[in-house]
Image: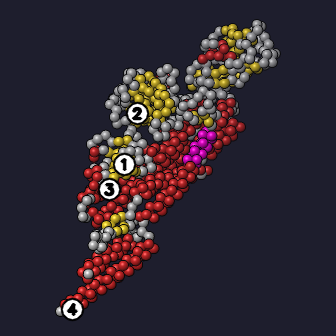
Amino acid sequence: MSYDLLNIASSGVRASSELLQTTSKNIANVNTEGYVRERTEFTTTIDNQVGQGDTYRLLNQFAQEQLNRDTSNKTFFDQFVTEANRVDTLFSEEANSLSTGINSLFNNVQEALNQPSSTLARSLVMTDAQSLINQMDRLSGIVFDQQSVVNEQLEIFSDEANALIQNISSLNQDIAAVNGTSNAADASSTYNERDKAIRDLSELIDIETLDGPNGEKLVFMGTGEAVVMQSGSFNLFSMTGDPDPNFKELTLDVNGGKAVPLEIDASKLKGKIGGLLAFRDDILVPAQNQIGQMGLAIADAFNEQNKLGMDANGELGGDIFTIPTVNAFAYQSNSSGVTSMTATVEPGKGDELPASDFIITYTANPNEVSIQAVDNKGELIGTPSLADTTSGVINASSMINGDESFGLQIAITGAGAAGDQFQVKLNSQAATSISLATGRGEDLALASPIRTANDLNNTGTATISAGEVTDVTTGSFTSDPLALTNGSISLVKTGNLNEYQISDGSNTATTIIIPPPGNNVLAQAGAPYSDYGFDFNIEGTPATGDTFTLELNEGGFDDNRNGLKLAELQNGELVRQNVVTTSTADNHKTFNQAYAGMVTDIGVVTGQAITSGAAFDALAQQSEAWYESLSGVNLDEEAANLLRFQQSYAASAQVLSAARSIFETLLSAAR
C-alpha cells in the first residue's frame, strides 16, 4: 500500500510541477506579441496514477482566420484614409484652387475689354495666365509627389511581405521536421512565430490559409494566388512598370522568376498594399488626369479663339499657351520597328479630350491602329476607334468610318507590327508642361479682324451684323499683314425680292438670293465667299440700292469683340466628362464645374473610406477580443491557476511525505 501511495504522490507532484511550469510560462509571456497561451491536461492510468501530461496551445482556427481577414480590411482603410486625407486637405485649400486662378484670369480679361488699348490691362491678363499655369503645375506636382511616395511605400511593403513569406516557409520546414515526433510539444514557440508572421502578412495583403501536410500552413492571397506552398516552396512579390516605368504594378514571381510573373488584380487586394494601390487608382490617377485635361482644354480653347482675333500690332492673333507634346510608352512585349510615337491635342479639339489615358494597338491590317480609352484602373472603356496611319499622323481626318479621335493628334515614326501596343498619357504628363507661348500683352487678340458697315445713304431698315470669324487658316485671310486677300466685300440690294448683288476686289458682282431671315449671307452665297472663314447677317428690311460692306478692321485696336468671345470661354462647357455617353446627355462642364467636381469626388471617396474604415475597425476590435479571449493570457485566470496548482503541489508533497513516513515505519517494524 505504501508503495502505491508513494507512486501516486510522486506522479501528483510531477503533474502539479508541469502545471505550474505551463502557468508560469503563460504568465512570463503575457506581454509577448503573438504568444498563444498553453494548457496542460492529464489522464488517469489504470492504477489510478496521473498519466503523461499533454501540453497544447489554446488556439481557435476560426477566430484566428477571422482576425486575419478583419486585420486586412482594417489596414486597407487605415492606409487609404491616411493618404487620401492629406490630398483632400491640399485640394480643399483656397490657395491651391484652380477655380481661383481661372476666375482671376477671366476677370482680368473682362477688365481688358473695358480698355482694349491699355497695355497694363493686357499685361495683367498675361500675368494671371502665368499664375494659372503655376497653380496647375503646383497641384500636379503635389499629385506626382504622392505617386512617388506610393511607389516608395509599395517597394517597402513588398519587401516586408517577401521577408514574411520566406520566414513562414522556413518555419513550415522547421515544424514539418518535428511533426509527429517527441519534440513536437517543444515546438510551440515555432508555431507562435509562424502564426505571428502570418498575421503580420495579413496587415500587408489579404490572405487565406489551409492546413498542409506535416503541420505546414499553406498561404494564399485573397485573389487566389499561392504565396507559401508545401515543401518550402514560395512565390515573392515584385514591382514592375510596363509600359510606364514610373507607374509601378504589383506582380507575383513564379518559380523563382523563371516563369512569367502573375498579374495581380489590384482592385481586389486588401491590406496596406491594397490600400496604397486603391488610393493611387481612385484618387491620384483621376486627379492627375483631370488637372491635365482642364489645363489642355483651357489652353486649346484660349489659343483657338485668340487666333480668330486681331492683336495690338494689327496682326492675326497667335497662341497664348504652348501645348506640350508627350512621348507614348511602348510595351515591353512589342516587336515592331516603331521608333517613336508622340501625342498632343489637335488644335480646336481640346473639348473632345476625356480625362483618361489611351491604348494604341496595331491591328492585323497594315497602316491601321485602334485607339481606346482606359479608366483609372487600366480597364478598357467603350469600343475602339480605328485610324489610318499612312500619313504618319493620327487626327480627326485620319479616323476610319467616322470614329472619334478623342481630340488626339499622334505622330508616328516607323512601322508597327500587329498586336504592338503603346500607352498615351497626355493628360497626366501635360499638367506640368503647359507654358506661355508669349508674355507680351500686345499678343492678346481682343479685336475682331473684320468690321461691317451700313452705307450712309441706305433708306431701308436693314442693318448688317458685326460679323463673326470662324477660321483664319484658309480663305481670304493672310497673316502678314492682316488683309482680306480679295479686298472688302460689298452687298447691294437689287429691286427684286430677296435678291442681292455681292462682289469683292477679285470677283465681279454676282446675283444671289438671301431669303429672310438673312443669316449667314456668305454661306448662302456659295463659293468662293462661303470659304472665306467669316460671315455676317442682314437683319431687317432693306430698300433697293441699300449697300452693306465688310472690310478689314484696320486700326480697330479699341475693338473688343474677340475679347468678348475669350471672356465667354469661362462659362463655356468645354471639359468632357465621360468617354461613353449618349447623344442626349450633357457630357461637358465648365472649367469651374469640372474642378469643383474633381474636388468633390476626392472628398466623397475619402469620406466613404472613413466611414467604411470605422466599421472595419470595429469588426477588427471584436475579432481581436474574441481571439484574445481564447488564446490570450488572462492574468487573473493564471493567478488563480497558480494558486490552485501550488496547493495541489503542496498536497501531493504532503501525501509523498506521509507515504515516506509509513514506509520508514514499516522498515523499522521489520527490524
Front residue of this view, candidates 454 and 5: 5
Residue carrying label 2: 422
Give the residue at x 43% y 76%.
640
Residue 632 quadrant: bottom left
Give the crowd class for mark 4: few <14, some 14-19, many >=20 residues within 10 Å: few
Residue carrying label 4: 668
Residue 28 quadrant: bottom left
Give the crowd class for mark 1: few <14, some 14-19, many >=20 residues within 10 Å: some
Task: Kindly tell me whether residue 344 is visible in this rendering.
Answer: no
Distance CA(mark 1)–CA(mark 4):
71 Å
Give the residue at x 30% y 49%.
229
Distance CA(mark 3)–CA(mark 4):
63 Å
The boundaries of the magenta stretch are 591-605
Residue 302 quadrant: top right
Residue 528: x and y, percent? 61, 13
Residue mark closest to the camera, 4 vs 2: 4
Residue carrying label 3: 168
For marks 4 and 2, the one nearer the N-term is 2
Q: Is 592 one of the magenta-colored residues? A: yes
For marks 1 and 4, the one nearer the N-term is 1
